[in-house]
Image (cartoon, grey):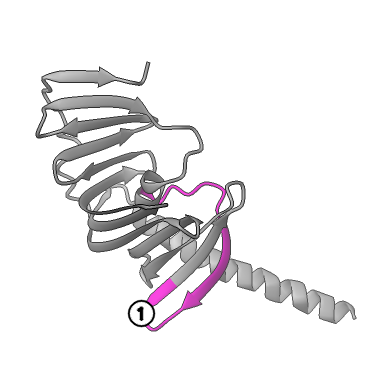
Amino acid sequence: MILKVFTFFLFSFSMMEEKNKWYSKFLDAMYVESGVSFNAYIDQKQYELNSEILAYVEVVDSNHLLIEIDQETILLSGDTIQTYNNKTNQLVIDRLIDDDIGVFSLLSGNLREVNILKTTIFKNIVRINFSLPSLDYKGFVEILKSGEPKRMRLSYSSDQFIDIAITGFRTGELSKFGSFNPSPREIINLYE
C-alpha cells in the first residue's frame, strides 16, 4: 500500500514538473534581457462586440510593453498606460486596474496566479491549458518546443475571449519602446 501511495505522489510530482517545465520555457522565451518583439493578430469578443486588430508588440519585461496598432501606440510602463492617437495627436494617460487580466497580461506573459491544468505535446507545438481560479478564467498558450509563443487565448466566459496569434517573434532589436516620446497637441490625464 505504501508503495502505491509513494508511486502515486512520485507520478503526480513528475506530471506537475512536466507541466511547469513548459510554462517556464514560455516565460524564459518572453523575458530575455534584450526584450522581445512580435506581430500579433488579436481577435477579441465581448458579448455582441467583435474586434480584430493587427498589432506590433515590444515586450521589455512583464510590466513594460509597447503595442502599435493602426492609428494608436499604447505604452504600458508599470501601472501607467499611455495611449497616443497618431491621427488626432492626442495622448491619454490612464492607470492599469489592479489585478486586471486582459490583453496586456497575455501580450506580456504576465499571468499571475496561473494554475497549469494540462500540457499537451503535439508534433511541433506544446499547448499549456491554464486557469486563473480567482477570476474563474480559462485559457491556453501554444508554444514551440523552444518556448516561443505562437498563440494565446483567454476566455472569460463562453461568449467573451481574447485570442492572439503571434508571428515574427524576435529577441532584442527593440526600436520603439525606448523612443516613445510623442508631442501631442492635447493630453488627457485620467490617472489622477
Q: Nearer the viewer, residue 189 or 129?
A: 189
Q: Nearer the viewer, residue 46 or 90?
A: 46
On the picture, is 184 further left or further right than 21? Answer: left
Image quadrant where residue 117 sits: bottom right
Q: Is residue 123 magenta?
A: yes
Where residue 105 appears, as percent x and y from the top left, is 41, 46
Image quadrant where residue 164 sits: bottom left
Q: Is residue 9 above or below residue 71?
A: below
The stretch in magenta equals: 108-126
Residue placed at 76% from the left, 76% from the top? 8
On the picture, is 82 further left or further right than 124? Answer: left
Where residue 175 appears, as percent x and y from the top left, is 14, 43
Q: Is residue 4 above or below residue 165?
A: below
Kind of residue at disc 1: Asn
* Quarter of the picture holding the C terminus: top left
Residue that numbered label 1 is attached to: 124
Residue farthest toward the front in the current orientation of the protein: 48
Residue placed at 57% from the left, 48% from the top? 113
Q: Nearer the viewer, residue 29 or 117?
A: 117
Where residue 38 appears, as percent x and y from the top left, is 23, 56
Crowd class of label 1 (few under 14; some 14 to 19; many from 20; radius 10 Å) = few
On the picture, is 55 further left or further right than 12? Answer: left
Residue placed at 38% from the left, 61% from the top? 152
Residue farthest toward the right in the current orientation of the protein: 1
